[in-house]
Image (cartoon, helix red, strand yellow):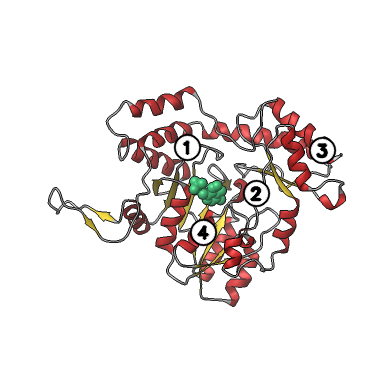
Amino acid sequence: MNFIPYGKQLLEQEDIDAVVGVLNSDYLTTGPNVKAFEDALSDYCDVNYTIAVANGTAALHLASLVLLSKGDKVLTTPNSFLATSNAILYADAIPIFIDIAKDGNIDLDLCEEVLKKDPSIKALYGVAFSGRMLDQKKLKYLKETYDIMILEDCAHAVGAKDGSIKAASCTNSDVSILSFHPVKHMTTGEGGAITTNSKELYEKMLTLRGHGMVKTPDMKPWEYEMRELGFNYRITDMQCALGLSQLKKLDRFIERRIEIVKAYDNAFKGSIVKPLYTYDGKSSYHLYVVQVDFSKLNITKEDLFNQLREKNIGIQLHYIPINKQPYYRGLGYGNEETPVMDTYYEECFSLPMFPKLSNEEQQYTIKSLFEVLNG
Ligand SMILES: Cc1ncc(COP(=O)(O)O)c(C=O)c1O
């Protein structure tokens, strides 16, 4: 069996043709594909404005610069990739790590307890972990009741729905971000996007994407003005052409992910392998996370990783609690009360989940997992 990673892109001939088409054209960057990709994403996500950027981290950075000021306190989750809370630090603001709920997302009830006690909290950065959106009713309630800014990190969740509300639609948040890294649902190589319904935030972030530089019709033809300190977070036309081509197939990719979910759910029913959540008709399933109580077994999680690696299966761990990373410990974090996250971290791992995973590879993964767990 060839190596089976936990996630991987699916590129087809028309994706390659789309990129080659741009290579043969006049504009490799700042050309027509960028706006076309942004418009297509706005359509898909049901949102007014989209800015395509170099990667998801750049999206988080720009969003944080417009949402936060120095010293602002921001509730966030320890169960994410480093980029989510790093972006709070980029803006000189202060992350406050809140425990997760049973589905791996930040516990919004705990957030409310903290918001009640501390009216100075400015924002909430949630992550639609593994593809499952934050509870939209609760998010709306928190936004209205506590008057906070909300960012939804939807890097895992493009294509997810909560009723009629789509991921990254910013229905109950100020800004959302997406990532198009190859392990995500659709890819542009590296790439990301920011979505918002606020014209004001959109214009600010657009300016920051391009060095803080402004060019208006009343200026002389050669003139431009730098009005604030921005960045070069542009994405290329090759990437956007790839993104446009991938976006057309996104629903098909998600349908395949759901088939994989159902087969895993079925295989683990009544066993020691507990899915973080089974098929729910909402998640767009970036990850398929399971939990195993290793204290009841003869093997450790490290044994499991190593033995599956020997069988050419690359399971992964999402995530090491961010607040316990050495850098964060150096800032005084790491001793928060997060019992659910602590147990989750002991027990969790992510199984291969990507549209190109064949039925044979999935069955091999399931069989190998049980063989290793049963010693
Ligand atoms: C939840 C989450 N947020 C943000 C990012 C950052 O995205 P990028 O890798 O495109 O910078 C990632 C990437 O893995 C992620 O998983």
State how far apart marks 4 and 2 are (Cα).
Answer: 17 Å
Please tell me which of labels 3 and 1 falls first in the chain.
1
Spatial separation of the CA atoms under disc 3 and disc 1:
34 Å
Quadrant holding the N terminus: top right
Disc 1 marks a residue whose amino acid type is Gly
Q: Dot 2 corresponds to which residue?
A: 318
Describe residue 115's horizontal placement relative to residue 342 as left or right. Answer: left
* Residue 151 appears left or right of 78: left
The C terminus - image quarter: top right
C-alpha separation, residue under disc 4 versus residue under disc 3: 36 Å
Decide which of tag 3 and tag 2 comes sooner along the chain.
2
Q: Earlier in the sequence, mark 4 or mark 3?
A: 4
Q: Which residue is mark 1?
A: 189
Could you tell me residue 123's position as x and y percent?
A: 50, 66
Q: Which residue is labeled 3 in the image?
A: 372
Placement of 54 over or under 79, stated as above or below: above
Q: Amino acid at mark 2?
A: His
Compared with 212, 314 (above or below) is above
Distance from disc 1 to disc 2, alpha carbons, whole Å, reads: 21 Å
Question: Mark 3: which secondary structure?
Answer: helix
